[in-house]
Every structure is written in structure tokens, then in C-alpha cells.
């Protein structure tokens, strides 16, 4: 410890110059190091790991970086946490460290780490990682005398009071090497002649560890629950519920703390357990429970079985399936699969299991948990459509992460999806949908083998139906990602006078500004705001953020500049769905052409429909040429409207929130098997660790027919906000499912109120019915003049500078009901 001027190399003979090595050497001579711009060579972020903070009620982050020669695990100063929250600092990208220090652990010998206090973020992808063959083979940089801390740095937080990492974006997914997986069954001969039945525990003595062993089968498994908070002196604050059964009935079993990392992954539905040294406690009443009436067994709810590492040390033996004996009379795992044609008949909140062929998968989003205790917590979820052949309508599934992130992130179109213990939700104005519960488990293609449900008659019927389907036909009905809103807003806007916790709260413009500022990466919020629509403009293409250039980035401690996207005001006609990457040969493409004629010096567009045969390979170029021709000949004034008072009101507005809008990630894409990896990566959350596969092919741009930018002036006329409106124009759009399609006049207000252009075009029928042109819709916007409206807004932070603000419905005041 006397000589801190050099580093200990885990590998000798490394000739390359190392920026990280130079930094560590210089830190031995000073408490804090401030680097000039020319000194700050880039390093790549290869992992970003989160854990409960030591000092405050919040989270800390360790990031592992490499300069291509060494790896170094560093602590991120809490002032920079916001960069993670906004997904500005992320794995797979380069950063420039401009200020850092070395922190010693004063209560532990031989432990210290580099603390990054200021940095600049580079571009979207790393130039360093592109030249590294195997990042895991690079040696870990450790200060001399601290070699023993390498073991700690592999999969444990730098702040040693914390023993494990959390998943980067939620608290309920297993994260790290400590979570054991795979089978660890025991072939040891067990004496099962003296076991106690669950019915005896319900009615018998409560002397905990004096009870005889239990022999039970798991019939339900809950998601993992993390209950850590500041000041809680428990190293592994986890809990998981299981419902177990024997011949006498069912009872809850709780796995506590250290046993969760050891056993949670290994205990699956259908597993048979021999349990010793358990305790019995009164059941916790304020928790969710699976619905188990279909098992036709007695349910014991007064006590629950608790398994702990200490006092006493529980003995859990997993019995291999081959050793399970019929004479034990353990019940079979039972399911309650329903078909889509039966869904409307089920009561609200009824439990069911479903299987379907996935046709749409939404991007993963997050919502903030409403729990009052502990640090800020988020749930992750996504929307999925799945067909089962019994109805033209799909199952609409709201799937929350169920501690199965490996499966949750792999859901994609063309896979067979099984979801258990889903709950039915009936809502006004929309088709019923299913939402996951704490006991929901999900399985996709590749995970079904050996699951107890494979022999269920409903599952077999579904498999037979899938054999009648053609992949190329199903592919034409698939989509991934994009903005998706479900359930659809009701016909009237309900506002409760007595209860302010409405599902869609009505907020002030000032509150909206605050909500936008606090949004974190992929966080979704639905809010309502009242005011007037003062301007409408048709935009040709969604926003595309500029690539960040390292030399243009400001220091992180300063305000990051917003990247303003180049927006085009002219209409971008949507190319036919036949111009898809999966097509072959010649296709017939519907092209709208504009004929220009002069009248008193003005320009008007007379449109006709024309069919042309084009080669698939030339589809994009021909399409772009026609777009350019239209853009050059279009009078932009015909594609915008302002209220007569907006010019004056604009001068009096104190703030105009105009950064939001529609982005490439706001538009759903057609799924293609050859683009599967890139599409999955785009729809999932930013990964905790960089992997070479993350540098897969770029996601192709979306085919967007344009959107409307709507300016809403708050009711007190102090703050205005720009929001995007993207109407549904085709029945192929996933947003049409359950959408009320009452005919309307295609005025600007009726479109904003309904969410679609009337009538919807069925692409499969190659309908030649022309929808109204954007300039025709904008021409009707005059009816918005001085109209008091309530706008439902969907907010979602897409990462970096991209904040999506989308109008999903507009109500006139006469359509508001006070309860």
C-alpha cells in the first residue's frame, strides 16, 4: 500500500497505450483529476449496473469501461444519475471522462475505485468496441495492493455494503451471476413415509420447526418481489410466493431473502419438493392470490409455509420427475385455457390461461409504481396481440415483466405465446383485454417443451390450427413497436369531483411541463389538459435525431443541448404495403399523383389515382422521386392552419413546449424474419451489458404517411405545447383493434375525436377508395377556433432528447361528464 503509483496487470506484455492506465497513474498523485478536452480520450461503456444506494433513498450505478486495452469498473457520481435515467449514458457507446477521483473504502483494507464526476457522451455506437474481438478477455485494471478487490468487482457493487445488483430498469427481474438456474435435483433416497399433510398444518399445532417434513408439488409461482430500502439491514431483501399442493389441498409457501437467489430460478410449476425445517406464520392478507377454483381442491389460507436461511435453516430438496411416485397422490397441475371467442363471456377480473400466435408486439415501456415506501420503483410492460383461430379478433394482452426477462424480451411475431393466470378487463368503449397478474408466467417458442400444459386439449387444438396457417400470409398481418394506446379513451371524458386519482388525471399546463421534465427513459404517462387548439400543421416525416458528435457535446454537469430534427411540412404519401422487404417479383403499387394548375397565381392540387407496375428493388427509389415531385409542387400554406388570435397570443405565452412529437420509434414497423434481431433490440430496453450482437444491422426506417402537429394553448393562455396526432388510416394498423369506428365527416375535429380517417382502408382488399388528403382535413380546422377542448396526451420518453407527445383523443367540453 506504500507505492500507489503503478497498477497491477492481470496480463503481461500489453504494448498498446492505455488511456485508463494513464488516468490511474495520475490519480495516485492527486485527489481529483480534471482533464482538458484534448486529454479526454474516449472509452466505451460495456456495462451499467444499478443497486440500492448507501447514502440516500435512491440508487447508485457502477459502469465498466474499456479503452480497448484495459477494462475498469468505476463508480458514477450521483450528480450524473440523470444521464442514466434519460438513457443518454448507455452501454455500447463511447464517453469522454473529463473529471474523476479515486475513492478509498475507509472501513475496508485493499478496496478503492475510480469515481467519475464529469463526462461527455459520444455518438450512438462505439468506435472502440468495433475494434475489440472479445471484450471479456481484456484485463481488469486494479490499483497495486488492491488485487483482492478484483473478485468483488466481478459481480458485486463497488459500495461494499450492498451485496448484489438490481436489473437496470426494474426491481423484480433476477440480475447477475448469483441467481442460480438449471436443474439441481437430488437423487438421494428420501424417507417419505413420515410426512405431514397440508390439512394438518391448517388445523394442528403451530410449533414451527417441530413439524414433520412436507411433500408437495408447485402449482403456481409468483413474480419476484424486492423490498429493499435505505436503512434495511438485509443483504438480499427478496421474497417469492408459491402455491403448493398435496392430496389434501393447497397452501402458500414463501421463499425469503438469501434463498431466493439460490432457488427461485429452479423452482418451477410442476416441481415436487421435500421440505424440512420450515416455519408457519399467519398468512399476509393484503396480497394478490391466484384464482384456483379450477383445481377443485381445498385452499388453506390461515397460515403460510416460510422457508428461511436461518432460524431454522430450511432444507429444500428438489425431487427429480423420474423419482416421483404415483402413490404419493400429488395432484396434477391444472389450467383453464380459454379461446378468443369466449373472452367476452368472462366476468371482469376472472382468471384464465391463453395460448396464441403473436401478430403484434409493442415496445417495452415503464410506469412508475405508486408505492409510498422505499426508493422510486418502476414496472415494465408491453402490449401484445395474439390470434388463436377461433375469432378474427386477437387477444389484446397487457404483459408486465414477470421476473422472466429472458422470455419477456424474446416475445416477437410468429411465435407461440402461452400466458397463465391472466385477468380479464372490461372497459367502456373498447374490446375486453387481458392483463397479467403477480402469478402470470409466460412461455414462447423454444420454452414449451416439458411444460405441464402441453397435454391440455385446448393447447392441442391450437397447434392443429397453426398447421393450417401459411407463414407468408401471417407475416403480412404482423407489426412491431410504435406508439400504442389501449384501452381506447371512452366517448365522454369522466372527471371525478371527489377523487383526484382518476385513471387519466386532468392537469394544468404547468403540471404538464413538470411531468415532461421528470419523465425517465421509456416511462409512459397518460394525462389530460384543457385549453384551445390554436394551430395545426401537417408534417411530412417523423423526427430523426441528429447523431451526437463528441466534439460538440457539452460537459455533463452543464445542460445538454436538444437535438432539433429537420421537419418537412409537405405531405409524404404512404407507399403501398406491397413494397415490403419480403416481397418478390413485380407488384402493383397504388400511387397518388398531383397535377398542378395555376389559378390567380395560386396553386391547387387535383389528384387522381394511377396504377403502375414497379420492380420491388426500385420501389423505394421510385417512391422517393414521387415524394420529391410532390413536395416541390405543394403550396405549404395549404397544409397548416392558425387561429385568428394565435399570432397575438403567441407573443404573450411564457413558454412553448415544442420539443415533443412523433419519432421513428413512434411508428409501428412490419415484422420481417431477416430483421428479427434488430427489431427485437429496438423494441426492448437498453441492455445492462453490451454484447457484440447488439451491433446488429440497423433497424430500417418506417414508412410513415405523415402526421399532424397540433399546438394546444393552456386554458390560462400562459403555456402552449405541441403534440403529434397520427390518425389510423388502415385496418392493418394494430391500433384499430377495439377502436370504435362510427362514421364521421373527416373534419380536423372529428378526426381528432375519433382517432381515424373514415372509412378505414383494408389493404388486403386493395381498395381504391381515396382517403381525404391532408390539405382537405387541415382546411376544416377553422371549427377549432375558440373551442374549449380537453386533450388526452400520451407521454413517453424514448431516450436521449426524444420525448414523444401524442394526442389520442380530443373532447369538446360538452363531452365531459362530472361524477
Image: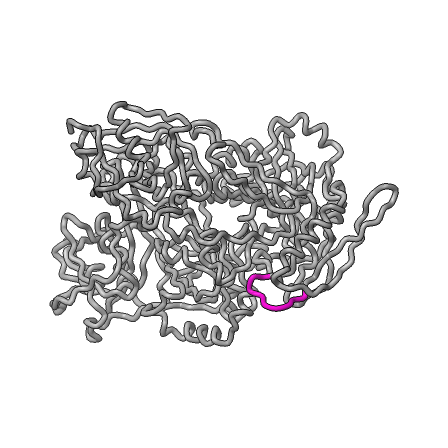
Residue interval drawn in magenta: 580-588
Q: Where is residue 163 in the image (x, y as percent from the top left)?
A: 24, 42
Q: Main structural element of the magenta stretch: helix, strand or loop? A: loop
- In the image, residue 586 lies in the stretch drawn in magenta: yes
The answer to whether residue 783 is seen in the rendering is no
Instruction: Note whether 351 is above or below 714 in the view shown.
Output: below
Question: Residue 521: where, in percent of width, then height?
Answer: 45, 42
Quadrant including the N terminus: top left
Q: Nearer the viewer, residue 386 or 239?
A: 386
* Location of residue 656 (image quadrant): top right
The residue depicted at 87 percent of the width and 45 percent of the height is 599
Of 569 and 750, the residue lying toward us: 569
- Extreme top residue here? 30
28 horizontally vs 86: left or right? left
Can residue 345 be seen here? yes
Looking at the image, what colour scheme do you see? Answer: one colour
Q: Position of residue 462 (x, y in %)?
A: 45, 73
Q: Does the magenta portion include 472? A: no
Asked if residue 79 is positioned above or below residue 319 in the image, the reply reads above
On the rendered structure, is 421 left or right of 239? right
Which is more toward the observer, 766 or 808?
766
Nearest to the observer: residue 749 or residue 501: 749
As displayed, is residue 424 above or below residue 524?
below
For residue 566, what is the image quadrant?
A: top right
Which residue sits furthest right? 600
- Residue 335: x, y in percent? 37, 68
Q: How many marks?
A: 0
Q: Residue at x 20, y 53 (%)?
A: 307
Q: Which residue is drawn at 75% across and 55% down?
A: 593
Q: Which quadrant, please, contains the C terminus?
A: top right
Amino acid at each position: 500500500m506504500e507505492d500507489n503509483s503503478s497498477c497491477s496487470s492481470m496480463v503481461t506484455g500489453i504494448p498498446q497505450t492505455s488511456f485508463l492506465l494513464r488516468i490511474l497513474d495520475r490519480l495516485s498523485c492527486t485527489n481529483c483529476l480534471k482533464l482538458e478536452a484534448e486529454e479526454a480520450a474516449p472509452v466505451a461503456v460495456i456495462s451499467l449496473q444499478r443497486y440500492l444506494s448507501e447514502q440516500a433513498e435512491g440508487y447508485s450505478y457502477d459502469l465498466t469501461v474499456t479503452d480497448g486495452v484495459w477494462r475498469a469498473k468505476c463508480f458514477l457520481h450521483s450528480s450524473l444519475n440523470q444521464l442514466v435515467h434519460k438513457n443518454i449514458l448507455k452501454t455500447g457507446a463511447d464517453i469522454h471522462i473529463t473529471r474523476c477521483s479515486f475513492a478509498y473504502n475507509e472501513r475496508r483494507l485493499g478496496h478503492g475505485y475510480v469515481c467519475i464526476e464529469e463526462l461527455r457522451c459520444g455518438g450512438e455506437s462505439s468506435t472502440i468496441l468495433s475494434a475489440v474481438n472479445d471484450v471479456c478477455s481484456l484485463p481488469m485494471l486494479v490499483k497495486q495492493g488492491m488485487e483482492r478487490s478484483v473478485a468483488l468487482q466481478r459481480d458485486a457493487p463497488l459500495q461494499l455494503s450492498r451485496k448484489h445488483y438490481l436489473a437496470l430498469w426494474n426491481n423484480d427481474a433476477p440480475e447477475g451471476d448469483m441467481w442460480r438456474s438449471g436443474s439441481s435435483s437430488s437423487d438421494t433416497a428420501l424417507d417419505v413415509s413420515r410426512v405431514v399433510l397440508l390439512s394438518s398444518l391448517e388445523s394442528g399445532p403451530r410449533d414451527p420447526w417441530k413439524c414433520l417434513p412436507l411433500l408437495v408439488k408447485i402449482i403456481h409461482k409468483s413474480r419476484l418481489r424486492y423490498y429493499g430500502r435505505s436503512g434495511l439491514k438485509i443483504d438480499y431483501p427478496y421474497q417469492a410466493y408459491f402455491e403448493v399442493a398435496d392430496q389434501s389441498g393447497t397452501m402458500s409457501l414463501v421463499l425469503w431473502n438469501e434463498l431466493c437467489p439460490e432457488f427461485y430460478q429452479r423452482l418451477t410449476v410442476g416441481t415436487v419438493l421435500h421440505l424440512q425445517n420450515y416455519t408457519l406464520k399467519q398468512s399476509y392478507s393484503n396480497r394478490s392470490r391466484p384464482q384456483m377454483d379450477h383445481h377443485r381442491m381445498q385452499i388453506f389460507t390461515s397460515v403460510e409455509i416460510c422457508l428461511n436461511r436461518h432460524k431454522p435453516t430450511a432444507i429444500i430438496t428438489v425431487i427429480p420427475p423420474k423419482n416421483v411416485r404415483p402413490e404419493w397422490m400429488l395432484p396434477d397441475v391444472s389450467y383453464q385455457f380459454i379461446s378468443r371467442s369466449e373472452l367476452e363471456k368472462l366476468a371482469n377480473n376472472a382468471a384464465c390461461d391463453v395460448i396464441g400466435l403473436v401478430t403484434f408486439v409493442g415496445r417495452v415501456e415503464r410506469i412508475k409504481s405508486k408505492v409510498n415506501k422505499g426508493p422510486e420503483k418502476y414496472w415494465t410492460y408491453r402490449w401484445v396481440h395474439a390470434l388463436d383461430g377461433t375469432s378474427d379478433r386477437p387477444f389484446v394482452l397487457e404483459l408486465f415483466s414477470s421476473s422472466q426477462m429472458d422470455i419477456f424480451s424474446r416475445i416477437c411475431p410468429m411465435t407461440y405465446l402461452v400466458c397463465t393466470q391472466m385477468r380479464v378487463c372490461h372497459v367502456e368503449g373498447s374490446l375486453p383485454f387481458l392483463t397479467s397478474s403477480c402469478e402470470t408466467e409466460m412461455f414462447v417458442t423454444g420454452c414449451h417443451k416439458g411444460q405441464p400444459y402441453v397435454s391440455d386439449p385446448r393447447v392441442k387444438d391450437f397447434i392443429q390450427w397453426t398447421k393450417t396457417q401459411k407463414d407468408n400470409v401471417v407475416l403480412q398481418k404482423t407489426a412491431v413497436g410504435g406508439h400504442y394506446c389501449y384501452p381506447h379513451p371512452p366517448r365522454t371524458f369522466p372527471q371525478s369531483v371527489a377523487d383526484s386519482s382518476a385513471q387519466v388525471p386532468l392537469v394544468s399546463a404547468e403540471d404538464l411541463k413538470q411531468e415532461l421534465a421528470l419523465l425517465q427513459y421509456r416511462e409512459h404517462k397518460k394525462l389530460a389538459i384543457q385549453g384551445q387548439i390554436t394551430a395545426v400543421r401537417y408534417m411530412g416525416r417523423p423526427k430523426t435525431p441528429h447523431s451526437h458528435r463528441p466534439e460538440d457535446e457539452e460537459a455533463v454537469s452543464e445542460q445538454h443541448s436538444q437535438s432539433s430534427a429537420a421537419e418537412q411540412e409537405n405531405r409524404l404519401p404512404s407507399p403501398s404495403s406491397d413494397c415490403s422487404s419480403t416481397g418478390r417479383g413485380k407488384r402493383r403499387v397504388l400511387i397518388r399523383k398531383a397535377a398542378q394548375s395555376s389559378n390567380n397565381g395560386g396553386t391547387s392540387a387535383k389528384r387522381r389515382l394511377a396504377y403502375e407496375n414497379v420492380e420491388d428493388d426500385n420501389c423505394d427509389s421510385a417512391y422517393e422521386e414521387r415524394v420529391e415531385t410532390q413536395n416541390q409542387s405543394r403550396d405549404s400554406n395549404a397544409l397548416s392552419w392558425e387561429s385568428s388570435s394565435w399570432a397575438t397570443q403567441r407573443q404573450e405565452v411564457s413558454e412553448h413546449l415544442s420539443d415533443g412529437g412523433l419519432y421513428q420509434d413512434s411508428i409501428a414497423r412490419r415484422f420481417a424474419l431477416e430483421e428479427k434481431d434488430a427489431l427485437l433490440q429496438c423494441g426492448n430496453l437498453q441492455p445492462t451489458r453490451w454484447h457484440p450482437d447488439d451491433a446488429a444491422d440497423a433497424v430500417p426506417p418506417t414508412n410513415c404517411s405523415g402526421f399532424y402537429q397540433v399546438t394546444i394553448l393552456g386554458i390560462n393562455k400562459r403555456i402552449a405545447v405541441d403534440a403529434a396526432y397520427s390518425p389510423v388510416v388502415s385496418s392493418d394498423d394494430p391500433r384499430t383493434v377495439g377502436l370504435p369506428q362510427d362514421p364521421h365527416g373527416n373534419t380536423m375535429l372529428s378526426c381528432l375525436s375519433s382517432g381515424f380517417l373514415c372509412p378505414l382502408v383494408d389493404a388486403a382488399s386493395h381498395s381504391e377508395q381515396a382517403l381525404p388528403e391532408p390539405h382537405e382535413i387541415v382546411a376544416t380546422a377553422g371549427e377549432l377556433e375558440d373551442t374549449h377542448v380537453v386533450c388526452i396526451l400520451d407521454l413517453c420518453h424514448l431516450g436521449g432528447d426524444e420525448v414523444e407527445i401524442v394526442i389520442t383523443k380530443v373532447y369538446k367540453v360538452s363531452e365531459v361528464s362530472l361524477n
